[in-house]
Each structure stands twice: as structure tokens, then as C-alpha cells.
Image (cartoon, helix red, strand yellow):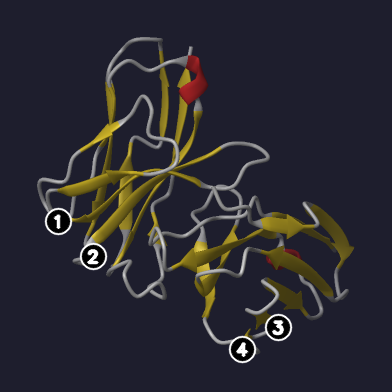
Amino acid sequence: EAQVTQNPRYLITVTGKKLTVTCSQNMNHEYMSWYRQDPGLGLRQIYYSMNVEVTDKGDVPEGYKVSRKEKRNFPLILESPSPNQTSLYFCASSFTIFAGTDTQYFGPGTRLTVL
Amino acid sequence: ILNVEQSPQSLHVQEGDSTNFTCSFPSSNFYALHWYRWETAKSPEALFVMTLNGDEKKKGRISATLNTKEGYSYLYIKGSQPEDSATYLCAPFYNQGGKLIFGQGTELSVKP
């Protein structure tokens, strides 16, 4: 089954404790992206990757890191989480982004709480 | 940062009602518009992708129109059902920047 998986689905952690949220897709997509969803705001892009070893900042990259060592995986790293990073996080992928018409496939989401 | 507005923010209708909501976006450098449907506790799923002015897409009871000149799109649901309850997100794609810009969504609740 074609899908985007994320782990963990739920996480409660404390300020300053490094964490990684994994994202994996099995559709051979080149483009992958991380978003956060906060009440009253649209999905805001954190980081994106056009292909392996190519990553770039989105609109809200502060406090996050990513890597793209393999095509299928795009982990999101919070080196020192803070309470303002409490949010719902989505990973998404699409075949490319250049055409502008490729549908993005979303993972199930990770609800993160930073105390 | 480009501003994408969706209205209304929320909508409560009775089963069988038809409804529509709006997505407004800057039309300069616009290339395509995506509509996604997001049910609670699930992931957003694609409904439509539209590119041409005057384009109209339909999937069952849901349809959408696009005006690229003035920068808006309407989503229509005919004869709403409880299973249509979800947040509907629009996301224009621009040639400059090469990414989707999501609106804040319209939350639809359909009561039996």
C-alpha cells in the first residue's frame, strides 16, 4: 500500500530533550516536506527536500533540523525542544514539486507536547 | 509571505443542505490550486488540483471552480452528509518559491 508513515504518533517530552520524528514514504517520491498545524493557522512549512541530500528552509524553520540521506526517509529533528514547538506535525511527499500539480500525500501526523 | 484566505472559518449545516465556501489568494505568479479534505484524526487527502481559469472539477457531490484572474476558488457540496464533516483546505501553488501555501481551512460540520 502506497503510504507515508510517521513515528511516533504521539509524544510528550520536556524542554531541551532532543527528539526525532521519523517520516518514510514508499512511493519513490522525490519531494518531501514537513508542516506544522496550529489552531487558527494553516499548515505551515518547516523544511522541504527536493531530492536526496537537497533540503531547504520553509516558512518556520527555527528550532528544527532535517536530513535526507535516503530517498524514502526525511526525519525531523528537534535539538532542544521548547513549549512553542507543541503542535501537530505532518510529513508529506509528492513525486516532484516543479510541476505544481502533483498531489501531496500526507502522513498520519505526530502530536507533540513539550512541557 | 503570501496570504491565502478561506471563508467561512467554520460552517454548521443540516444533512441534505447544499453548501459552499471560498478560497481567496493572490493571483500574481499563480500556477495551480489544490483542495484537500482533512477529517479529524486522519491525514489531509487530496480532492482536486486545478490550473486553468474557469476550470471546474467534480467528485461525486463535491465540485470546485477556479477564477485565476481574480484569485478565488469555490468549493461546493451538494446535499451534505454527516460523512462530509471535515476541514477543507485550499493551497495555491506559485511559480516563484515552488511550494504550496495553505489556507487556514473551513471546518464543516453536518448534523444528521
Where is residue A45, by image quadrant?
Answer: top left
Q: Which amino acid type is shown beneath numbered disc 3?
A: Arg
Q: Which residue is mark 1?
A: A71
Describe residue A52's horizontal placement relative to residue B71 as left or right: left
Pick whichever, B14 or A79, lies toward us.
A79
- Image mark 2: chain: A
Residue B16: x %, y % from top left: 86, 75
The kind of residue tagged 1 is Lys
Secondary structure beneath disc 2?
loop
The chain identifier of the residue carrying mark 3 reads B
Are labels 3 and 1 assigned to the same chain?
no
Q: Are marks 2 and 1 in contact (CB under 8 Å)?
A: yes
* Label 4, residues with CA under 10 Å away: few <14, some 14-19, many ≥20: some
Q: Secondary structure at mark 1?
A: loop
User: Mark 2 is on which residue type?
Assistant: His
| Distance of label 3 from label 4 (alpha carbons) | 17 Å
**In the drawing, what numbered circle is on residue B42?**
none
Residue under numbered circle 2: A29
Q: Tell if the residue under mark 2 belongs to the same chain as the one under mark 1.
A: yes
> Of the numbered discs in the image, which one, if any, rests on residue B55?
4
Q: Pointer 4 indicates a residue of which chain? A: B
Residue pointed to by mark 3: B61
Q: Which of the 4 image quadrants contains residue A39?
A: top right
